[in-house]
Image (cartoon, rainbow, N blue to C red):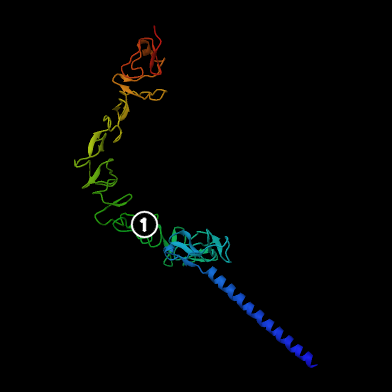
Amino acid sequence: MRYFRILFVLASFTVAACATTGSSEDNTNQNVNHNTNTNTNTNTNNSTGACALTCTQADHLCIGPDDSHQTCAEKCDNNTCDQPYTCCYGGCVNLQADPNNCGACWKACDDEASCINGICVDACNNMCGAGEKCCGGSCTDVMSDATNCGSCGHTCAGETANACTNGYCTCGPSAECTGNKTCCAIGCRDVTTDMANCGSCGHACAPGETCVDSKCQCGSSGNACNPGQGCCNGTCIDLSSDDDNCGTCGNKCENGNTCNGGKCNCGGKTCKAGSLPGQDATCCDDGCVIYDTDMNDPTWMTGVKNCGDCDTNCAAGTLCTFGQCVGGN
């Protein structure tokens, strides 16, 4: 009997010891899992500011559409993340609560808005109408509000334009320009120096000219160029006949062509190039270089001029073929 009592005590001690060991293992597992989840889910959601300045951990990266709307997220392990996180472009983010990735990767909410169940919710509870945004907790018409023009906080500067029209800063009768500027169609402009509005709105200076004291001028001449002229390197040039500036400044006529009516040609005629390399469209004093006789041109019967080069003339009835006189008696 004493022997059996001893065995019972030992068995009880063994069971108790096993139970204690099992409890210790459970606590250890719980601690390990808790630590793992905490490390995985610790993301810093930045609604504004440059994420890269603070997200410097080797196992983290910034996820979001731009520098002002990115989240410092832990890198995805084998493209998987613990719930409720989703792997977006290499980082684990919570699409249900991340304002920089709300409902979808790289879908950022407006500033001051929160991400609730994957939907961006602003301080106005998404009650603003068309053309309005929630600015400072109130629905604001950003199409016409000069202090929130186009977006919250974008104030139209007085010297540029101090009214808001269709989300753009403009000016008008009730919003005059300051700084001695004039209200033009595209906003406040300094008509004393603006080449697109020189002296008055809409009066543009020609290419190459500058606007000085409300007057267009070419170089230091103090005067604008006449119609048909161009301001080339500070000098007024007749673009209709200048061989070095034909039609536009810097367009130089070559291969004997001259400028006629603003186009490079051979006395009004356009020369043709030959079919072989080196047979350029060249102009001579008395006409173009000919490389192939045009049988529809009756002048070939009297002799083709400038066959292959200037001053090489073929006899009457002789063809000019590939720049050479061929045939005849």
Residue 111: name its quadrant.
bottom left
Residue 221 percent coordinates (x, y): 19, 40
Looking at the picture, how far across and down is residue 313, in whole percent? 33, 14
Locate residue 89 relative to residue 200 in the image: left or right: right
Relative to 326, is 208 on the left or the right? Answer: left
Residue 213 drawn at (x, y percent): 21, 47
Instruction: Please determine whether, in this image, residue 215 is positioned above or below residue 325.
Output: below
* Amino acid type shown at disc 1: Cys
At horizontal 61% and vertical 78% (from top left) the residue drawn is 27
Residue farthest to the front, as pictured:
3
301 left or right of 63 in image: left
Q: Is residue 25 visible?
A: yes
Badge 1 crowding class, 10 Å Cα cut-off, few under 14, some 14 to 19, many 20 or more, is many
User: In the figure, residue 40 lies in which quadrant?
Assistant: bottom right
Choose between 314 and 199: the one closer to the eye. Answer: 314
Q: Residue at x 73, y 87 (%)?
A: 10
